[in-house]
Image (cartoon, helix red, strand yellow):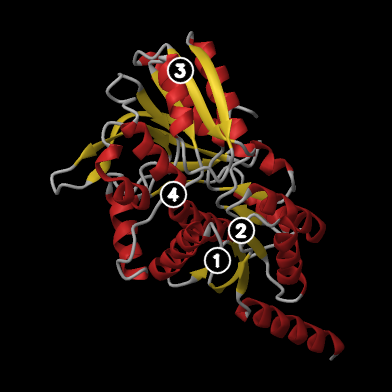
Amino acid sequence: MQRTLLALCFSLCSAHAADEPIRIGVITSLSGPAAQSGEQMKAGIDTWMRMNGGKAAGRKLEVIYKDDTGPQPEVAKRLATELVGRDKVDILAGFVFTPNAIAAAGVSERAKKPMIVTGAAASAMTSRSPYLTRTSYTIAQSVQPLAQWAYKTGSRRVFSVVADYAPGHDADMWFTSSFKAAGGAVIDSVKVPLATLDFSAYLQRIKDARPDAIHVFLPNGQPMVAFMKAYREKGLDRAGIRFLGGEGWADEDVLKAAGETMAGIYTAGYYSYFQSGPGNAAFTGAFAKTVNNRFKPNFQAASAYDGMALIAATLAKTGGKVDGPTFIAAAKGYSAASPRGTVMIDARTGDIVQTIYIRRIDKLANGSYGAVEIGRYDAVKDPTK
């Protein structure tokens, strides 16, 4: 009788556990200076849920969003602690900013909770918790192919201008080292304050230096628009100084705000909504319904969407088990088709492996400006690892 009762209890408890939703706590910026990035992440996640019925491994997925309000590591740490302790989430995800992700990684490690980074791009991120993986990119991963392509297509003397914060420093370091390794020279570099919107003095200095190209890394959004307008006003394009930018320059908000000033610039990145192929067509169609056509997806939306796809595939592999060691072991080696092309998770580092596309901004048939693929580097790993 006792054995029968124990077996019945075990059966009932297992059934109850299977009925419980798998909770995913997403920490992102839904207000403050990076609210647009957070909105893109949320829309990417919601689009995956729309397309896949909100389930994985036969269990409902419940997404709980928390607003970190911007680059606030203490806030992110508190939110991660609350999500794990009070909200009983099984997985942490999101993170626009590297300092926020680093702060939450400590919570992930102590609680042995899987953590999927869909934004923060510092190379060292995946070493911050043994239960962490990433579906976005690293700065070095996109900048190295850009530098190699620039040299291959004729640039020899480049001036580098980056925002004065950690991602900008990484961009400057990796572009410089990669371009020099190819045979080129970075003749000078300048780090501008993070909130800079008036670039005229910097651009005059660049023009006077007479490089054949400039490499630029700035925060997404308005700084990019302001820089492009000043680049044209100062006549750097007419002086034959071509523009080399990283991720974000092909985003809808930048293209619409900067207009024709974007024409002819070159960018490197892993996703653009102009991406060809049925995977992206399905994604952008569903995304349009998710946001009621208010805006188009950018690289952050694609990464968040892929974060959900990774979670679902890994849960299917583990049979719904979500403990950190089991989950992260199953996630390593993941490979799948994505709106951006084929993505993989490196079995050794736990970081993303993907195609980096070289694009030129051109005027399209409808009169708007868009990104046209002119080169690609497949299966790119983070070169720092």
In the image as oriented, which residue stretches furthest toward the right?
2
Q: Secondary structure at mark 1?
A: loop
Query: How dense is the environment of label 2, judged by Cα within 10 Å: few (below 14), some, or many (20 and up)?
Result: many
Tell me the CA gap for discs 3 and 1.
37 Å
Q: Position of residue 116 (x, y in %)?
A: 61, 54
Residue 358 percent coordinates (x, y): 36, 31
380 shown above or below 120: above
For label 2, the residue is 70
Q: Which residue is rendered at x = 38% and y = 14% of the image?
A: 155
User: Who comes first in sequence, dot 1 or dot 2?
Assistant: 1
Q: Secondary structure at mark 4?
A: helix
Dot 3 falls on a residue whose secondary structure is: strand
x%, y% of residue 283? 34, 57
Q: Which mark is residue 222?
A: 4
Mark 4–mark 3 contact, CB under 8 Å? no
Q: Amino acid at mark 1?
A: Ser
Residue 121: give its label. Answer: none
The label nearer to you, 4 versus 1, is 4
Left or right, residue 45 beside residue 121: left
Which corner quadrant holds the C terminus? top right
